Amino acid sequence: MNNARDKTRQIRIGTLSLGGGSPVAVQSMLNTRTADVTACLNQIDALRCQGCEIVRVAIPSSQHLAAFEQICALSPLPVVADVHFDYRLAVAASVQGAAKLRINPGNIGGFDRLNAVLDAAHAADIPIRIGVNAGSLAPRYQDDRRLSLAEKLVASALEFTEHCALRGFEQLVLSVKAASVPDTLAAYRSLSRELPEFPLHLGITEAGVSLAGTVKSAIGIGSLLEEGIGDTLRVSLTASPLEEARVGWEILSALELRQRHPYLISCPSCGRCEVDLIGIATKVEQRLKEVQLPVTVAVMGCVVNGPGEARRADVGVACGRGQGAIFKAGKVLYTVDESQIVEALLSEIASLSLAQTVEPN
Ligand code: SF4
């Protein structure tokens, strides 16, 4: 499909390529204290295991720069320096191992300060994200009653991007986030039309706690990705960053853009179901969190849709009265008692994993 994502400029964030048709990258932000280097590195490693590809670390003050430098030196993932208010922190981070800088036009100060950040990023050969956020727009935009929120977000991004271009700095990623899904969609669609060459970082900011935040992010980020817009995503949840990475991958899997983790298909169950399907599916979902294989698993309640979905999946079960027929690669293998369904599915998934390990490339 010919889409906006294929036409953006490709930039590098550490060893990762972003934009220009590269796979949509999943990122998150640490919620450990930056000064606690061990806790930060542990969380980075846990995020890496969840498929997170870029991590962002807050630098609240100059007292956190030494810790930030250590985190960058030891992190297995590219680290983005998240800086607000004090441009000097961004300048310092650029020589301390940051793979990218994230600054906010609404609070980084005037263009003279931005110039210092641009020059530092240029010298370090790292990109910058211009992260415009509805909650921290510059006062001149906040007070402008002629513009909608989406127009304000885009105007701020355009203003900063044009200044960066005049300064000869174009290694930019842009974001225009709001907590409202419609405002965010309008802003990104407009930005993608106005500046098609720049990679876009997608997100619904302050999306909320787990369920509401996941729904908003899936609709907002998912809609844009489906339209071909967006090169990287961060799901912002009032929850663990690990959950953010998981939801990010679920969005990519649901759109069939990328798959890394198992993809679970399960029916809602109904009056025809004669097993504890919700219990079985919940246990399978829990156990699949440990599986690092892009396998599709179907857990189905009866013969109505069960055999069809189970046959289409890599591994599946179609349940009947107190038992389940186990499918693999489109064929029924055997039938087990309800109490053995979870283990049987996991065992068949493990055999797929083993086959993938021993198969030559
Ligand atoms: S597959 Fe069977 S149990 Fe599941 S929702 Fe459909 S009819 Fe009901």
Image (cartoon, rainbow, N blue to C red):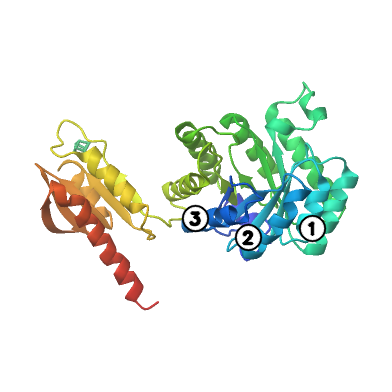
Alpha carbons under labels 1 and 2: distance apart? 15 Å
Q: Residue at x 56, y 48 (%)?
A: 228
Q: Is residue 11 visible?
A: no
Alpha carbons under labels 1 and 3: distance apart? 29 Å
- Mark with earlier residue (1, 2): 2
Circle 1 sits on which residue? 121
Circle 2 sits on which residue? 78
Q: Is residue 318 left or right of residue 247?
A: left
Within the image, what quadrant is residue 188 found in? top right
Residue 167 screen position, x and y as percent: 87, 53
- Looking at the rendered image, the disc whose residue lies closer to the viewer, 3 or 2, is 3
Q: Amino acid at mark 2?
A: Pro
Residue 230 screen position, x and y as percent: 59, 48
Q: Ligand 1 shows up in which quadrant of the image?
A: top left
- Mark with earlier residue (1, 3): 3
Residue 124 lies, with reference to residue 250, above or below; the image says below
Q: From this viewpoint, which residue is outermost toward the bottom?
A: 360
Q: Residue at x 77, y 22 (%)?
A: 146
Alpha carbons under labels 3 and 2: distance apart? 14 Å
Circle 3 sits on which residue? 46
Q: Amino acid at mark 3?
A: Ala
Residue 312 screen position, x and y as percent: 26, 54
Q: Amino acid at mark 1?
A: Ala
Within the image, what quadrant is residue 85 found in? top right
